[in-house]
Image (cartoon, rainbow, N blue to C red):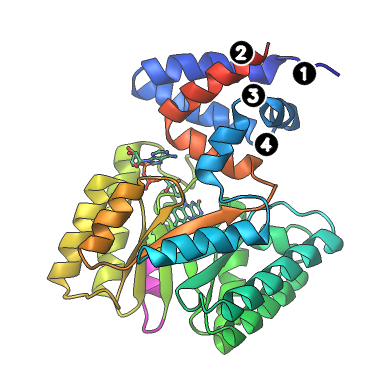
Amino acid sequence: MPVRLDAPCVTLVAAAGRGVRGGRYARLMLRSVILAASRSSQVERLVATAPFTRDVVRRFVAGAGTDDALRATRELVADGQAVTLDHLGEDTVTPEQANATRDEYLKLLRLLGAASLTPAAEVSVKLSALGQMFDEQLAYDNARAICVAADAAGTTVTLDMEDHTTTDSTLDILARLRKDFPSTGAVLQAYLRRTESDCRELAAAGSRVRLCKGAYKEPESVAYQSAREVDKSYVRCLNVLMSGDGYPMLATHDPRLIAIGEDRARWFDRGPDRFEFQMLYGIRPEEQQRLVGEGYTVRTYVPYGDQWYGYLMRRLAERPANLAFFGRALISKK
Ligand SMILES: Cc1cc2nc3c(=O)[nH]c(=O)nc-3n(C[C@H](O)[C@H](O)[C@H](O)COP(=O)(O)OP(=O)(O)OC[C@H]3O[C@@H](n4cnc5c(N)ncnc54)[C@H](O)[C@@H]3O)c2cc1C
């Protein structure tokens, strides 16, 4: 059946043009349209069959299989970087899917250990992929099984953070996991108004906290809306984490925030074993190498698997220039 450029797709492509050329308002509108599209199965079908999709996906995703994940990890570790691996998939709706995701992580961790890629490589896990949306206990049990496997392989787990409706549940599960696996990492999103306070709670000895800006479409009631407010919140949170007793993981590609991170590392005398920078696979690789060259610990977040759609759309929402490229591909399909 031919793929139609129906309403959401037309809106997406039209918004791409305006957002890339336009000012701050147009860019904000573009971001919301793409994030809305990340939930549309119509747009997903269109994107999956667009001619340039493979090239765009390949830039941000290591590949579909576990062997692709291992290959990308080997290359990054050889370049002096640490890695966190994410098996793509979210919003799982059946226990079978949730258990299959758990089993993929168990297999991955066995292979990472056998290849001596731990502790340089750890794993990042989305609780929604482990059943959080329909059975919180199942998500906890699956996450715990992954923590057991990570521990056996000599490495750790970080729980990704999803939209704000899951924050409390994710932090509750984190607290339960940390009783037996204290190095389990948390993610906090600077765009949420609550995050500075969450940082204070979690900036304790032994606590690993990844600080990112946040990648979901969130309402004003819970999240700062402007880039300036989000950046200011990021700096406040960074100060709390870097001056605290935990292990901060500064996840950003933003040159100004990276410079502030370097400054605070000097100020608080934090060497490469007391905090790290984190960036996404395929984004600013030269900057990743520059930081490695400066002696910092840099961890690359490496996604793999065939469920790449939601992840790719969030990356496109962050950078209109990537979308213009993609928008041309969608139009040329017609
Ligand atoms: C390791 C890691 C883990 C993450 N985990 C989570 C999580 O669990 N939950 C969550 O909500 N979010 C997560 N994120 C995403 C994060 O919230 C942001 O959406 C994303 O990092 C973009 O924000 P930024 O800080 O890089 O700043 P931005 O203001 O978006 O970007 C700053 C600069 O970085 C470059 N850049 C940024 N994005 C791109 C891109 N897509 N393509 C090309 N260049 C780009 C550009 O030069 C841009 O000007 C994670 C990010 C990282 C790095």
Q: Closer to the observer: label 1 or label 2?
A: 2
Mark 2 Cα shell of 10 Å, populated few (<14), some (14-19), many (≥20):
few
Q: Earlier in the sequence, mark 2 or mark 3?
A: 3
Q: Earlier in the sequence, mark 1 or mark 4?
A: 1
Q: Residue furthest left?
A: 267
In magenta, the rendered stretch is 198-206
Could you tell me residue 333's position as x and y percent? Answer: 66, 15
Mark 3 Cα shell of 10 Å, populated few (<14), some (14-19), many (≥20):
some
Q: Which residue is mark 4?
A: 39
Q: Amino acid type of disc 2?
A: Ser
Q: Which residue is mark 1?
A: 3
Instruction: Tell me if label 1 and label 4 are in contact, CB under 8 Å.
Output: no
Position of 47 relative to 244 (above/below): above
- 273 sits left or right of 63 in the view: left
Q: Amino acid type of disc 4?
A: Arg
Q: CA distance from mark 1 to mark 2?
A: 12 Å
Q: Closer to the observer: label 3 or label 4?
A: 3
Taking the spot 49% from the left edge, 43% from the top edge, the residue there is: 221
